[in-house]
Image (spheres, helix red, strand yellow):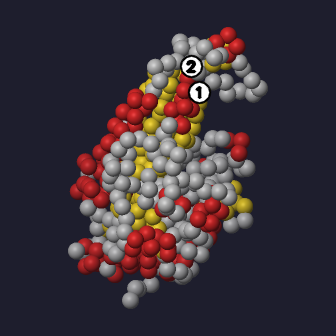
């Protein structure tokens, strides 16, 4: 039996204030990828640290890194109880293309039941649900049912380059029986989901260079190999006719899954029609022999996420550019190693580069895939928490996305990460007009409160 962990009215009394504070948090333009926002990330970290002190957490620190700060806080007065590490990130994706936003990206705007702003869902709104759950418990009960450590970073959207070294240096301080983060999505508004697998990631930039400077396309067109055209030709050779990635050795370590696992996925995950509806398109694409859900979870992928070269302004300009670049994003699956995949990509690009141009490959992000045991007691605690907060049992889903720190927590802390997300498939994460469904914010707070109580109830199992 789980004891009542908060006054029934404690959350409802403070809803308006919680929403106002979430808006304050979102207004910081914390775009970690853009150097012009470095001071905004520092200001946001200071605000967040002050807020954590205000709600009653202890040991609050803003910890500098070579790029953006880490915010740490704790409450360790639950003697003999499990310890939960709560992870989140306060940095956000760039807002471009700005013209496609219907509301200012850093001025939170409520339309119906949705809060529109960059970071409203990924990850400020979801992370803040945990903060408000802690506050609700401390204000109504004066204590928490378990020990809490909060680790909030400002670099997740750029691959968390400084978080792994920080965790390595502070293993003892960060030791926990379980980690929980809310940076994933549900299957639908009435169907919560627990994510138990994440793909890894590798982000590269491919540059093609030709002549020393831009050339007149009339004087030299047909005589000079256009670097932008050469880039497109190289990109076209990265997939074969069967939509498989055409890099030799790429699939060597891709794990094969049993029929039982694939049947489990088919029974619990989205079908092709749902995925196409969420993507707002009518036609799928990809590797034969796999459903769309499988293509985005248990199979690797390569996406061209940007191409730059030549004239980008209005109208036309008769020019052959001297250089062109493409951004390539690989999503990797067990048991692929991003370091080995990068080596294979570089070798393949070097092999297929024509003698008329030069190529260079730069690496920006690498993350290993992660798997979480669906049967771990902490996952069972999350199932019960969702049933309390959303009135429905969660399904277990794989995710095509990457969260680099999940694998690090498993390797360095030996702790499972409960991926307890509150986002909806149509919340437009990483896209213009990102939003957060406000009923999920408040149900999320309720779910987070219950999760801590359920972890406390499984004390011996979780600390075994």
Is label 2 in contact with label 1 (beta carbons under 8 Å)?
Answer: yes
User: Can you say whether 214 is above or below 404 in the image?
Assistant: above
Direction front: furthest residue: 241
C-alpha separation, residue under disc 2 versus residue under disc 1: 7 Å
Q: Nearer the viewer, residue 405 or 207?
A: 207
Q: Position of residue 416 (x, y in %)?
A: 32, 65
Disc 1: which residue: 229
Residue neighbourhood size for the residue with mark 1, other residues' Cα within 10 Å, grouped as few (<14), some (14–19), many (≥20): some
Res. 378 visible in picture: no
| Residue 225: mark | 2
Viewer-closest of 90 and 258? 258
Position of residue 259 measured from the top left corner of the image (x, y, whole percent)? 40, 71
Q: Is there any visible trace of residue 318 in the rendered image?
A: yes
Residue 402, position in %: x, y?
Answer: 44, 53
Q: Quick check: 383 above or below 122?
A: below
| Residue at figure coordinates x 25%, y 48% from the top left | 169
């Amino acid at each position: 039996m789980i004891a009542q962990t908060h006054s029934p009215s404690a959350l409802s009394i403070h809803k308006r204030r919680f929403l106002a504070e979430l808006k304050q948090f979102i207004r910081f333009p914390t775009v970690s990828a853009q150097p012009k926002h470095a001071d905004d990330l520092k200001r946001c970290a200071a605000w967040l640290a002050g807020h954590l002190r205000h709600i009653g957490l202890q040991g609050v620190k803003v910890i500098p890194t070579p790029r953006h700060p880490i915010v740490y806080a704790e409450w360790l007065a639950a003697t003999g109880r499990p310890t939960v590490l709560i992870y989140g990130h306060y940095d956000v994706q760039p807002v471009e293309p700005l013209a496609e936003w219907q509301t200012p990206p850093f001025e939170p705007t409520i339309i119906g039941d949705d809060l529109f702003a960059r970071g409203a869902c990924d990850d400020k709104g979801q992370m803040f649900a945990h903060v408000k759950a802690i506050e609700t418990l401390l204000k109504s009960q004066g204590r928490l049912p378990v020990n809490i450590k909060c680790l909030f970073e400002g670099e997740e959207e750029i691959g968390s380059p400084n978080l792994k070294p920080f965790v390595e240096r502070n293993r003892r301080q960060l030791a926990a029986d379980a980690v929980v983060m809310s940076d994933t999505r549900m299957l639908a508004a009435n169907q919560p989901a627990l994510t138990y697998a994440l793909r890894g990631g590798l982000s590269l930039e491919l540059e093609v260079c030709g002549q020393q400077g831009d050339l007149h396309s009339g004087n030299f067109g047909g005589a000079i190999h256009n670097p932008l055209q050469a880039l497109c030709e190289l990109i076209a050779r990265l997939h074969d006719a069967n939509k498989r990635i055409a890099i030799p050795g790429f699939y060597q370590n891709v794990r094969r899954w049993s029929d039982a696992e694939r049947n489990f996925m088919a029974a619990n995950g989205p079908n092709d029609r749902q995925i196409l509806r969420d993507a707002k398109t009518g036609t799928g694409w990809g590797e034969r022999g796999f459903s769309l859900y499988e293509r985005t979870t248990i199979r690797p992928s390569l996406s061209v996420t940007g191409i730059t070269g030549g004239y980008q302004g209005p109208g036309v300009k008769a020019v052959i550019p001297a250089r062109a670049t493409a951004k390539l994003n690989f999503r990797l699956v067990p048991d692929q190693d991003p370091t080995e995949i990068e080596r294979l990509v570089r070798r393949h690009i070097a092999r297929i580069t024509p003698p008329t141009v030069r190529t260079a490959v730069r690496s920006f992000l690498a993350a290993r895939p992660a798997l979480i045991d669906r049967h771990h007691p902490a996952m069972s605690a999350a199932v019960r928490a969702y049933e309390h907060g959303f009135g429905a049992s969660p399904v277990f889903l794989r995710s095509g996305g990457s969260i680099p720190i999940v694998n690090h927590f498993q390797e360095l802390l030996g702790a499972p990460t409960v991926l307890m997300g509150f986002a909806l498939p149509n919340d437009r994460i990483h896209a213009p007009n990102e939003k957060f469904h406000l009923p999920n914010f408040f149900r999320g707070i309720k779910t987070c409160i219950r999760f801590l109580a359920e972890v406390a109830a499984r004390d011996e199992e979780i600390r075994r």
